Image (cartoon, rainbow, N blue to C red):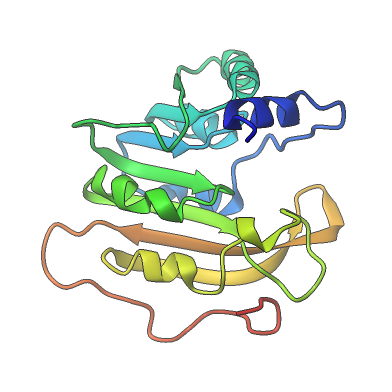
Amino acid sequence: MTDPRDRWNERYEGPTAEFPDDPVPELEGRLSTLPDGRALDVATGTGRNAVFLAEHGYEVDAVDVSDVALERARDRAADRSVDVNWIRADVADFDPGCQRYDLITVSFFAALEWLPDLKDALAPGGVLLSEHHLRSSDPVAGPSSDRYRYRSNDLLRACLDLTILSYEERRRPIAGDADETIAVATLVARRSSGGRQSYPNESVADSDSTSR
């Protein structure tokens, strides 16, 4: 079996590898509503979310298994004159210890298996922002195998112990390529310090765009 580090290094070293500079739209659009403080960016890749958060005053830990990706991320941070604590680790092996985060971001990484640990790493009132590819009956960009895509409502069900602030399943254009779309599930949820959790009143899944 190929080591995850080697597999991802090969991907980031590829001659046609292109990775976006901007943070995911949900993070950029919701920034003013998110708690300040310490942030963790999981599977940071080339650091687009981590650098964005550091630029806006967060103390950021960013984890990825790929040496190549983290080197590009360090260069990006240096170009923007911000500091990020880059951590080379497989998410399966990463242990935040007693550290608690006010914001945790997970973008386009199938993290269902590790969500319990990530939720435990949220500080009271801390927010999880997670986005990943969905299975779709229509041609969309992203992983070629459904093995690496979420089913409809997988992400929502995995976070019902948090207060759900927003959950949406939709297709959207890829940044810089209006002719190509991705199917995504996007969740924003808060770790409440007490009282009852709250949930969306109705399903927001787009049954026309995603397969169940």
Tell me where residue 15 appears, x and y as whole percent: 86, 26
Specify whether 57 is left or right of 25: left
Tell me where residue 86 appears, x and y as whole percent: 46, 20
Query: Quadrant of the image for the N terminus?
Result: top right
Visible residue check, residue 47: no
Q: Is residue 164 above or below residue 180?
A: below
Specify whether 123 is left or right of 34: left
Visible residue check, residue 200: yes
Specify whether 195 is left or right of 160: left
Tell me where residue 100 appears, x and y as whole percent: 23, 37
Q: Quadrant of residue 69?
A: top right
Q: Quadrant of residue 44?
A: top right
Q: Nearer the viewer, residue 52 or 170?
A: 170
* Residue extending furthest toward the front: 1
Number of numbered callouts drawn:
0
Residue at x 80%, y 32% (from the top left corner): 17
Q: Is residue 35 above or below residue 9?
A: below
Tell me where residue 184 appears, x and y as whole percent: 62, 63
Residue at x 45%, y 45% (from the top left corner): 105
Query: Quadrant of the image for the C terminus?
Result: bottom right
Residue at x 72%, y 53% (from the top left corner): 143
Q: Is residue 48 above or below residue 68?
A: below
Residue at x 82%, y 68% (from the top left corner): 139
Specify whether 17 is left or right of 33: right
Q: Quadrant of residue 140?
A: bottom right
